[in-house]
Every structure is written in structure tokens, then in C-alpha cells.
Image (cartoon, helix red, strand yellow):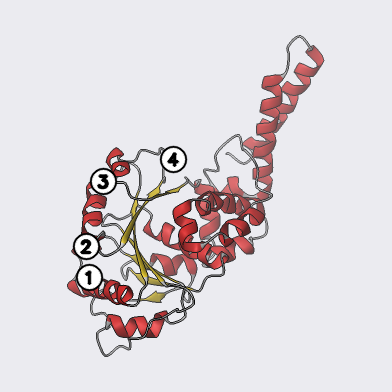
Amino acid sequence: MSKLNKDEQLILTIVITNAGGVGKTTWAEQLNGMARLSEKKVIAVDLDPGNRGFLNRNGDDSAVPLDWSPMKIDGSAPADPGRWYEEHLAGQNLVILDTGANMLAAANSINQFIGGLIGVARENGSRVIIYCVTSPLKPGSDELIELMYNRFRRGAEVVIVQNNRDGSGSFASSLSAMGTPVIALPHLDTGLQEVRLRRRLPLDVVLRQPEPGYERATELLAKRLLAVAKQEPVIDVVGRGAMECLQTLSAGAPASLRFRLDRFMHASNDAIRANERLMMTNRQFMAAVPENEAAFFAAARAHWEAEQKWKAYSR
């Protein structure tokens, strides 16, 4: 079998965790979006027929769908990893396999296909990276990560992705002792999540073409993704192009807000401006000197007015 991508090494990545709801698809679409922003040739594969989370978020043409059983390419014959590799990955820089929950206990067909694909990729000189995704306060997540680490580390690089879903940062301490690279996904406020999910488009398209009325929320989305793109294990895969692009896309994002964007109504341009204004007046009021009575009461009034305006978006 001839090697593919002679000019640039193909990277086969598999996003996996046996637990559900930890953010596998979140990471898969972020990695896909950053690769596209870096102008990489990337193909995503949705291996979760029960949910199709990647396709549901990014659109019907955003990924190649594969079922667990039977694995098919043309509807008539079981998928052969070598044939699939040749037909789908020629000319690609990066492939992202977004798996479903309980994949390790799934039908043999999917495990055999992935195992065979890893073998073919290694034979062709491709890098293989297993992304083990975890989230805070997920019972047994550290044991699952260790299980996957021991299962895959001899045939692939293993990277832990810590998805700070609830903002607590409460990850199992044993994970850091494993010595594997770690990628940190920052918490994303609910309002920003809803802005992203309103359109079934790839993440990079959402960031480049903001929905009217939600440009500032989109800049905040780009700012959160920039924090991911700056991390060395990410640069190692997608390069620095995504980071440079996201710096431009997030240039107008607010430096700080008084309150989190916990609802969709908090994410409109007007609401974010009101939130930003409230933060500024709060700082001015806290810095005001009571002895300067006129300035103190002016700062207090400005803060009160900003608070009333923000409350209009918090009812």
C-alpha cells in the first residue's frame, strides 16, 4: 500500500471516552474548527449512530457517517480499514473520529475497524492520537481514562482533554500523575453555547460569519477557542494558523463582564454591552472616594442606572 500525504504527515485522531456527556463532540468540533481555520485538509467521521452529535451540530455535509454494525462503505460489503483509508484519507492532513459513549463495550465491528485503521495508519507512517475526554465530577472518569490509556498507549499517542463543563475545574488528581499531555477546554457559558448551536454549521463558519445581533457573543466564542488554540498539544496538531486567525476574530471581545451569560437573552449584542457597562460602573463606584461627595454620588447613580438596564435582560 502506498503512503498517503507525502508532503505532510497524516494525523489520525480518535476522540473517545466510555462515559457519555463529557464533551467528546465538543472537542471533536473544536479540533475540526481550528484545523479548518489553519487551512488544514481535514475530514471528520461521525461514529455515533445513536446520536450523530457532530452532524447535528455542524451540518449534514460536515462529516462522514459510519454505523457501528455492520460497518459499511458502499452498502453491500463490510468496511475494510485499508480500503477505507485509501478511499477517504488521500490528500488529507487530519482525520477526526468522533465516537459514541460505551464504544469500548460496543459491537466488535467498530472496535475491529478502529483497531485496523490504527494499524493501517501506522503502516503508512501516520501519527495516531487518542484524545481521552473527561469532565468535572464525573464518577469513575479517572478509572476510565486510565483504562483507555493502558489500552491504547502502545499503538498511539494519548492526550487527555479536560472539558471544564460546569466551571468548577474539579478533575481527578490522579489524571495529572499519568504524565500525558493535557488540553484544557475552558467553561463556556450557557448563553454562548446556545448562540453556537442555533445554526447547523461548522464552528469555523459560525465564527467567521456571526449571526446578526450576536456578533459580540461570537467574538467571545472565538476568545474561548483562542485559549485552546494557544496550548502546545493543539499547536502540535493544527499549527499556529488557528491561533492567529482567532486573535483577529476575537479582537473586539469584551475584556470582562459583571455577570456570566447564563441565558440566551444574555448573549445579544445589547445585553453584552449592558453587562460590560455594569462591570465598568461597578469598578468606578468601588474606586470612588466618599469624601468627594459629588463624584461619589455620580458614580453610584451611574452604577444604579447600569444595573437597571442589565436587569431588563435578566428577568
Residue type highlighted by circle 3: Asp
Dot 1: what SS? helix
Locate residue 172, reporting x and y percent. 30, 40
Mark 3, residue position: 142
- The residue lying furthest to the right in this view is 294
Of mark 4 and mark 2, the one earlier in the sequence is 2
Mark 2, residue position: 104
The mark found on residue 167 in the picture is: 4
Cβ atoms at labels 3 and 1 below 8 Å apart: no
Dot 4: what SS? loop
Residue type highlighted by circle 2: Leu
Against 211, is 9 above or below? below
Locate residue 137, reporting x and y percent. 31, 41
For label 1, count other residues whose C-alpha is less than 10 Å away and answer few (under 14), some (14-19) or many (20+): some
Report the residue at 69% width, 49% height from top. Answer: 252
Q: CA distance from mark 4 to mark 2?
A: 28 Å
Quarter in which the C terminus is drawn: top right
Report the residue at 21% width, 55% height from top. Answer: 150
Camera-side mark, 4 or 2:
2
- The residue lying furthest to the top in this view is 291
Cβ atoms at labels 3 and 2 below 8 Å apart: no
Residue type highlighted by circle 4: Gly
